[in-house]
Image (tube, rainbow, N blue to C red):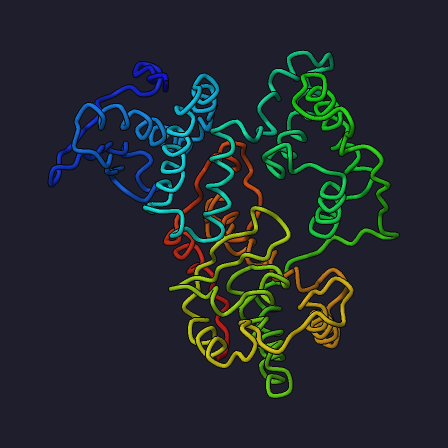
Amino acid sequence: MIPSPSLGVIFRGKVTLINQNGMWHAELTIPKDVRQILGKRKFRKSMRTSDKSEAARKSQFVIARWKEHIAVARGKGGDVSFYREMYDNTSGEGKDVLEEMFAELVVDDYGKAHVSQLSPSQLKNSQEAFQLMTGKETRTDIYIDEWLSGWDVKLQTMNQGRRYVEAMALRFPVVSMLTRKVVKAWYKELQEEKGITVKAFNGRLSPCKGYWSYLQDKGVVSEALNPFDGLGLRGKKRDIVRQPFTVLEIRKLFAHLKAESNQDPQLFQLFTLAIYTGARIEELCSIKTDEVGDGYLEISNSKTVTGVRQVPIHPEITDVVTSMKMASEDGYLLSGLNGKGNQYGKRSAAIGKRFGRAKTKLGFERDKVFHSIRKTVATQLEGAGVPENITADILGHEKQTITYGIYSGGTSLNQRHDALLSLNYILDN
């Protein structure tokens, strides 16, 4: 048997049920303050039944989900414990019914009728939401407040520890993701992108170790391994902080690579894609022609979970992308690359070195690399006043808050497209 939700707990306000062609639909008007964020005025969904009583019961779950989206848009909410508690308190065939409902809800988050219609990035996010709702996965952040309440340290230390543990929870939203291997990869990522030292990273990990031990004591995770122990991290002899290219430097590189495009068209194409998407070099080199959608690029091969995303195609590269797709001979947008000569099989290895030689020839130092283009895009978006959560969805960065990072369904493709229009290098085409 499935326990009925408590209406007073789940939502405050009137649920509108509409009969259309004999089938009942649930509808909820979105408050004005979050309509722009959610990109619509109303939520509406078919209950797939002609029975009003059945529709009213099913609508409670749907409305609860919609109310949660509204709370997330306001910077609050994101707690799926209601669904998990209901699932835990249900037995027998009731669990099967709830799983079917939950599956519909997470697919409906993206305005789709069936899971087959989801993009790869949407599919991953919906699967994660389903696992959390059914208790088959545990959110990494779920016991942070409880752990902090028993941590006997000064307030300043506690606040700093909270920031570090929440950052870890954003990077690894569910506990099953945390292993020594991925924590070491996380360090390398921060070392490359932000120039973090081993000492600084170990300082961040200290409260994470304590929190993990707390999860072990509660029986949430295995006592056999703490993924923050025994990492054996090594720093570089000299930490180099990567700097963004200025707009003038982008123009200089563009002019040079365009002049050399007869000899190396791939490098010019790669650079052009990068300055209008902000994508990582391996992400761009791994895009397949069937991942070029209607006005967007599907990035499915990313180093992080948040990196799997859809990036709108800027008007300046529409023709470039079309011609590249038509000319491809191997199914990749950047055709003719291969990773056979690289021990990790990276398609970007050789062309990345060619960019390195080109920028060095133009007089750029070691703090300016291909990744600097990504920083340039981020800088340009920030200067244009683009909200951080939209920039994060464009670049595949972790969100800066727990609410946006774990529970938000993400910004719309139109929002990301409008944000990218602010990129204007005034290039000589």
| Residue 260 picture location, percent across and down | 63, 84
Residue at the image position 49 percent from the left and 41 percent from the top: 127
Q: Position of residue 296 (x, y in %)?
A: 43, 62
Figure label count? 0
Outermost residue on the front side: it is: 92
- Name the residue rendered at 69%, 36% in the picture: 178
Image x and y of residue 294, in percent: 38, 64
Q: In this image, 343 relative to 95: left or right?
A: right
Residue 71 at least partly seen: no
* Residue 132 rendering spot, x and y as whole percentages: 51, 31
| Nearest the eye: 206 or 94 | 94
> Compared to 27, does 273 lie above or below?
below
Residue at the extreme right of the image, as rendered: 237
Q: Is residue 167 visible?
A: yes
Camera-nearest residue between 225 and 10:
225
Residue 228 vs residue 29: left or right?
Answer: right
On-image quarter of the N terminus: top left
Q: Is residue 228 above or below residue 289?
A: above
Left of 17 or right of it: where is 293? right
Residue at point 31%, 21% (across, down): 11
**Quarter of the image where one finds residue 315:** bottom left
Viewer-proximal residue among 176 and 247: 176
